Image (tube, rainbow, N blue to C red):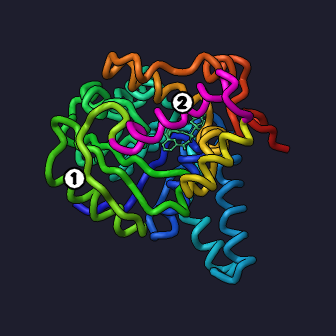
Amino acid sequence: MEIKKVMVIGAGQMGAGIAQVCAQAGYDCLLHDLNEDYCLRGLGVIRKNLARQVDKGKMTQDQMEVILAYIQPSTDLHNASGVDLVIEAAVENMEVKTKIFRELDKIAPDHAILASNTSSLPITEIAAATSRPEKVIGMHFMNPVPVMKLVEIIRGLATDDEVYELIEGMTKTIGKVPVEVNDYPGFVSNRILMPMINEAIYTLYEGVATKEAIDEVMKLGMNHPMGPLTLADFIGLDTCLYIMETLYDGFGDSKYRPCPLLRKYVKAGWLGRKSGRGFYEYS
Ligand code: NAI
């Protein structure tokens, strides 16, 4: 089997980036979301990213138009009937994801691979919502997708070796570095990163230091490119909370309890950069 046509579900910050890198590698790509406005917003982000490359002299205007022509918007999941691979990047919520996978299982061709970009939810459980668990796999891209090299490839309990190899090969084709991990909450990346971010939020919550001071300590002291609170805003505070809840539920260990301040911000709609306000304000 050869992967030629891809559908990306969710045209948010991750989905738009995934569609962009797939199109840049010459894959026909459908960018699917709940309505046309969301699709157009995602396409607008891709256009802006590519235009920046044109401004820097890294690609021509013509090359940009060729890449954009590979991406078509979609608001009808039935469009999955013509694809070889679906990469789901909708919200980090098990109910939403299993509903999407159940529907995709009915629509997508038998040979199609169904991948999820989930940051932390069990691939095995998502796969169990389908009649093809051997063709379900995790492709965990990093944010921002066009810049970050890593893709964690997560094998569910039933994932076929052949499916793993196809996805590993495709990941290399789109210019990324695949790393194989097994299916446990948070995988490797968020098992380690998210408790650090949560602890930074506790540090703020307990008044140990200001948000600026916490970020400065981690930037200058630990040589991190950005502080943990800035990074949380960048990831999205709703996504951070979902991941902490997945770790807490999955391991049943109190060390993973989400900080009440994180919950409060999410309830207030302060979701970070994408909503204009999180720990910091964005214009
Ligand atoms: P986002 O909130 O920017 O985008 C989510 C998109 O999914 C929205 O456009 C929304 O309208 C759409 N959506 C929601 N339900 C849908 C449905 N039923 N059908 C089609 N589209 C639907 O979120 P973001 O940050 O792009 O995250 C998406 C996924 O990627 C999550 O699972 C998240 O955990 C994962 N992820 C996020 C990272 C990050 O740094 N934000 C990094 C790696 C993975």
Residue most toward the right?
283
Q: Circle 1 sits on which residue?
A: 164
Give coordinates of residue 181: x percent, y percent. Answer: 26, 47
* Residue 34 visible in the shown view: no
Q: Is residue 236 left or right of residue 257?
A: right
Q: Residue at x 64, y 39 (%)?
A: 229
Magenta segment boundaries in residue numbering: 188-210
Query: Would residue 224 be visible to someone looking at this image?
Result: yes
- Rendered position, 257 above or below 204: above
Does 275 sit left or right of 222 as displayed? right
Residue drawn at (54%, 40%), measured in percent from left and top?
A: 10
**Residue 125: image x %, image y %?**
28, 26
Q: Residues within 10 Å of mark 1 (few under 14, many from 20)?
A: many
Q: Of helix, strand and loop, which one carries label 2?
A: helix
For the point 39% across and 55% down, which residue is it?
151
Name the amino acid type tagged 1.
Answer: Tyr
Question: Hey, which quadrant is residue 262 in on the image?
Answer: top right
Please tell me whether the stretch drawn in magenta is mainly helix, strand or loop: helix
* Quarter of the figure that contains the C terminus: top right
Does residue 21 lie above or below 231 as drawn?
A: below
Residue nearer the viewer, 111 or 15: 15
The magenta stretch spans residue 200: yes
Q: Cβ–Cβ below 8 Å for labels 2 and 1?
A: no
Residue 5, picture quadrant: bottom left
Mark 1 residue's CB less than 8 Å from ligand 1: no
- Residue located 61% across and 39% down the image: 232
Residue 11 x, y percent position in the rendering = 59, 44
For mark 2, what is the residue? Answer: 198
Residue 128 falls inside the magenta stretch: no
Give the mark nearer the N terminus: 2 vs 1: 1
